[in-house]
Every structure is written in structure tokens, then in C-alpha cells.
Image (spheres, helix red, strand yellow):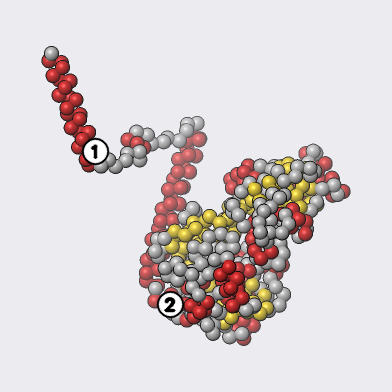
Amino acid sequence: MIDMEPNAYLVLANGQVFTGKAFGVSGTVTGEAVFTTGMSGYLETLTDPSFYGQIVVQTFPLQGNYGIIEADFESGRSFVSGYVVREWCDVPSNFRGHGSLNDFLNAQNIVGICGIDTRALTKVLRETGVMNARIISGTSLEARGEIAALASPAKKTALVRKIREYRIVHPVAAVSPAETESEMNRADIFADAARVHALPLDEHGLPLCAEEAFAAGNGKKVVLWDFGAKANIRRELLKRGVAVTVVPAAARAADILALEPDGVMLSNGPGDPSDNQDIIQAIAALCKKKVPLFGICLGHQLLALARGAESLKLKYGHRGENQPVRDTVTGRVYVTSQNHGYAIAAESLPAGAVLRFVNVNDGTCEGIVYTDIPAFSVQFHPEAAAGPRDVNFLFDEFIALMNDPKRFKKLAPIQKRAAQNAVAAVQGAGARARKKASTQKVSAASGHAPVKKTGAPAQKKAVRAVPATKTADAKKAAVKKSRGTKSGSKR
């Protein structure tokens, strides 16, 4: 990073101000400040439509070290409002890369700020919750006026009030394509995936050849309902041999049914799911027709709302490539890529909806299987890009569902019992957390620190198993020493 740029400022809705250096284009911009924990994948983050209207804070300190690689973009342009990093690499190195991160931000007209303590900023957002923020950089008349306002308590209060009033409006309409689109050749997509070792796998974890990968999906038609879809969702479908047609968010249920799809993919996208009532009603109409459905991220939330569940806003969301989720059926934990600020309330799931995945960190709903209709959905991103591909097999489950629409109905009893156990575990964890918080409050009110357990229970964790032979030898040595001591005392 070249340290010759003028000062820039990040002003939070709580009044805190972080001073850094100008990065990207000069100007002022307001957005919802969120943090993402990915150590890599800055290109996918910048081009993910789900970040529309948000100022993205990268927690990993160095960004841009492998330059700009257009083949890794998840959409045609960037949708972030602003970008915040600790440091950016001005001399990137990668045989596929062209240009720097700063060049990209300038080309995309994105205001950024670098050189601030992103660790301190992340702690604020984690403890207080996501909030609106404003980046001020450059020497324009507006920027100079706002920088001067930060020195005046009255003017700063007025600026902060303006920041708090910001709202993200109609985000899905802003990122969805305007027209129905046909997809590129599946053989080209498969060949490209082979070059980067991103092929579908068999049950033993070995890559499939094109003929094997296309076998289950041959002849199947999928409609990708684009609410802000990442490009890799399309790629994963095409790699499995299906024909894909992309329709805009404004499409009606009748428009989709007229295409006679074997299945419908409900994509990711930005914003509050409950704001999309027209889409929710259209999804409900598809459910009545028993069309196989697979929802990802926003699509997962919209499907759940269409079935009668409720959504909630998380304190700071799940954004990054290291989010652990647990399969309630198998008990296996997967590390997933996620980007969302809302979730479905697990306790609001209607009859026929079974909790399939839960977040290991906070117990929130991460996936649902519907046993009364051929549908399932996940809150995380099985297509990754960027992130681990541990749950890529869910695209194979979608192909299997299209071939056997009664697939989940057969598994209903097993999944229901597993989900009930998962809900009980989540409720138990919540009760323990509330009890702990209550204890801490009482201790704080009394002026004493919370009581911690000490003694044997704490030491018990440090005890390690000792082989039986060593234990026997130790006992013999102790007995021998004891006898020697006694005979010495007699002398």
C-alpha cells in the first residue's frame, strides 16, 4: 500500500470515527457496515450481489495480493457501496491476475478506506451489531464540508442523524437481470471446471468425468430464479448436465410454469426477505404445483416465508468462509461459505418443514427439508465461490429430487426425529446462555465478580490417561521408596 493518499474517515451511526487513507475513488457514501471473515475471496465478495447497499469490512488484514481475475467474478460488476481494509497490496502477484485492487475500485466507482484498525472496527460491529456508516474521502466540496463538521459537536450530531436514516431500498430489483437469459454450453463449463479441479465428486470423493456427471441431469430443465444469483450457482447446475434458464426476480409463477421446468432454483440475493411479498406469493403458487425447489440463502428464506415460517434479523450476521453447520440427520459438521444478515426462526417452522442443518456457533436455522412438497433449502452457499466445497453435494441432491420428487417424504420420520433432537439441543444451549447472563447481571449488580468453579472439577480436564504398565511401575517404586525410608528410620 502506498502511504501517500490523503486522509479519509469512516463515521459510524453510533458517532465513532475511524481515520484512515483514501482508497478507490474519492467521494462520500453511506451504507450498512458489515464484516466478512474470509482470508481470501475478495473478488467474489466485491462481485456478490448480496452485498448490495453495504459497506464491506474485511477482517483479514491484507487484501488484493493476487490482483484482479475476471474469471473469478460472481457477477458483471460490484454491488458494494463501500470497501474497508487494513492494508491493500499495490504489487499483486498471480499468473491469472491483471491490475490492482485499487484499480478495480476506481473502475467500479467504489469509495474505499484503508489503513484503519479493522480489528477494532469489527469488535464494535460484533458487540453493538451491524449499523449504518459513511465513508468520507477526497477534496470535493461535500467531503471537505463533512470533514469540517466532524470537529463541531452540533454538526457532527446532524451528520450522524443523517447516517442513521439511511435505508437499503428495493435491493432485489436493483441486482436482478431485466430479462430471461439462456445459459452457455455445459461442456464448456465442465471443461473449465476440470482445469481448476472443481468437478462434481462421486460418493468416494473422486472427480467424475463429463459422462458420469451429466448422467442424472440429462434432459432435465431448471429455471434459475435470479434474485441476485452468484455465477457459480449456474456453473454447478450446468456441470451436472441440466439445461438452465435464468428468469428475473419480477417473473410470475405462470411465467415460470410456462417454461415447463423439472425444477426451480431459488437464488441468493440482498436485503430483508419479508420485503418481497410478490415473490413469496409466487413461490407459494409453485409449491402448490409440487414443482421441485432448491433455495439458497435469500431463496431459502423466501421459501420458508412462503410456507408460513418467520424471519428475523441477526445481530451481525454470518459472513465469511468458515461458518460451521451441523447436519441434524448424520451429526456431521461442515464448514461453509455464508453471507446473510437475516435467518429463519427455527421455532416458527410449519408442519411438514424439518430442520436439516443448524449453525454450530449460535444454533440458528441453516437448512430445511420439506416432507409435504418436493423442496429443500439451505442458508449457506453450497456453490462456495469463495470458500470450501464441503457441501457441494447438495446440487446432486437437487438432481436426485427432480428424478424422485417423493425423495424427502420417504425420509420424513428419520429427519423429524433428528430435527427434534437438534431443536432441543438449541433450546438447552439458549437456556444455559440466559442463566449465565442472569448470573453475570446479578454479580455485577452486587459489585462482585461472577463466581467461577475451582478445585477438582477444573483440574480434572488436565488429567491425561496413563498406560497401565507405567501406573504399575510407579506403584512399585513408591512401595520400594516407602520401605527404604522405614528401614532408615530404624537405624
Q: Are marks 2 and 1 in contact (CB under 8 Å)?
A: no
Whether residue 317 sits left or right of residue 482 in the image: it is right
In the image, residue 37 lies at what x, y percent?
59, 52
Measured Cα–Cα span from mark 2 to mark 1: 55 Å
Residue at (37% x, 71% y) in the render: 413
Q: Dot 1: few (<14), some (14–19), or many (≥20) neighbours within 10 Å? A: few
Amino acid identity at mark 1: Lys
Which label's residue is closer to the chain start, 2 or 1?
2
The residue under label 1 is: 470
Depth check: 223 or 254 in front? 223
Residue furthest out toward the top? 491
In the drawing, does residue 127 fall left or right of residue 31?
left
In the picture, measured across the screen, residue 97 lies left or right of residue 481, that is right
> Quick one: which residue is furthest to the right in this view?
141
Disc number placed over residue 407 in the picture, else none: 2
Residue type at tag 2: Arg
On screen, residue 368 above or below 217: above
Mark 2 vs mark 1, foreground winner is 1
Q: Position of residue 350 (x, y in %)?
A: 48, 69
Q: Where does the image place residue 341, in percent across and percent down from the top left?
A: 60, 58
Seen in the picture, residue 411 relative to 122 is either above or below; the reply is: below
The quarter of the image holding the C terminus is top left
Which residue corresponds to the image point at 18% horizontal and 32% vertical from the top-left? 476
Residue at the image position 22 percent from the left and 33 percent from the top: 474
